[in-house]
Amino acid sequence: MDKNTSGGSDFLLASAQQQNQCAFESRRRLPQLNVEIQTTYENLGALLFLLDRFASCFWGCHGKKHVIEFLVGRTVSCARAALRLIEFGHYDEAMALIRNIMEVGNLMWLFFVEPDHIRGWLDAPEDERRKRYSAVLVRKSLEGLGAGVPHEQTQYALASGTGVHPSPKGPQSHNLHEVPTVGGIYQEKGFVSCLVKLAWATASVGGPAAKLAELDSGRAQETVDAATRLVEELPDVEDYIEVTGSSEEIKARAQWTDENVRGKEWSDG
């Protein structure tokens, strides 16, 4: 083996172990968080359970070339992956997937408000579909219809700026002191913020999709109710106050590393 690659597999194993430890911490600390956060976690799981069955045609197929099922399936897949990334402490990467769900949410709402767009979206050639139904034009179409936009430009831009586009801000800085990390470290601020954004994005797809797909009325209502309950019980985390002290732990860890590993004094600057 090339000496330059020696130990590569050891690093990957250690990285996976760190992620697993962070996932353990995420679940261990969940009961310590505000009851509204715990409720959001439970409600998100309940909606994803229904949407997973919906997407896999567990209750039967419902026409429209499975377009609704496929979009719901994409949402479920992204949501499950995002949740794992949140548990692993990779909050920036989770936001990239949440942005994908936001885009589906706006498109699904456009289909719900003006169902003719379903046929237009299906029949348009690939290049034309990408132009006519880009995230920007879908948002503008909804604004033109006066229908409201589930995910407005500022929300979408925030998700893009955090999880997709390069930024001079340090990565994974989801703590009160904005100490950057490379993921795999529990940060309560990141966990809570990403979980709530993921929940809202998922609900924005699930509610209208259940009605559009012409599910059995009982199944459709169950799914709509689950999406509605998730939205109605979402907490406002704009001024969220940490309860686990994870930010202080991260600062102390960074300070110890600077003083004992890098050999330099710690400063808040």
Image (tube, rainbow, N blue to C red):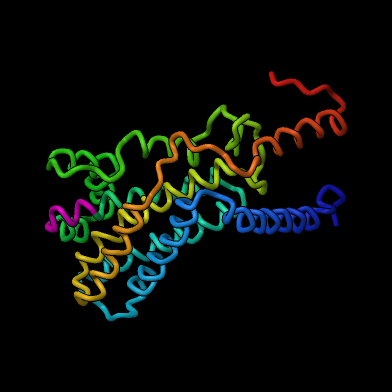
* Residue appearing at x 71%, y 33% in the figure: 251
Q: Position of residue 8 (x, y in %)?
A: 79, 53
In the image, residue 29 sits, relative to residue 61, either above or below, namely above
| Res. 268 image quadrant | top right
* Residue appearing at x 20%, y 65% in the figure: 211
Q: Position of residue 252 (x, y in %)?
A: 75, 34
Q: Is residue 208 left or right of residue 180?
A: left
User: Residue 77 or 260: which is nearer the viewer?
Assistant: 260
Give the dominant element type of the magenta stretch: helix, strand or loop. Answer: helix
Q: Is residue 102 left or right of residue 41?
A: left
Q: Position of residue 85 (x, y in %)?
A: 56, 53
Task: Verify whether residue 3 appears in magenta.
Answer: no
The residue segment tinted magenta is 109-116
| Res. 226 image quadrant | bottom left
User: Residue 134 or 225: which is nearer the viewer?
Assistant: 225
Q: Is residue 50 left or right of residue 195?
A: left
The image quadrant where one finds the C terminus is top right
In the image, residue 204 sits, relative to residue 182, either above or below, namely below
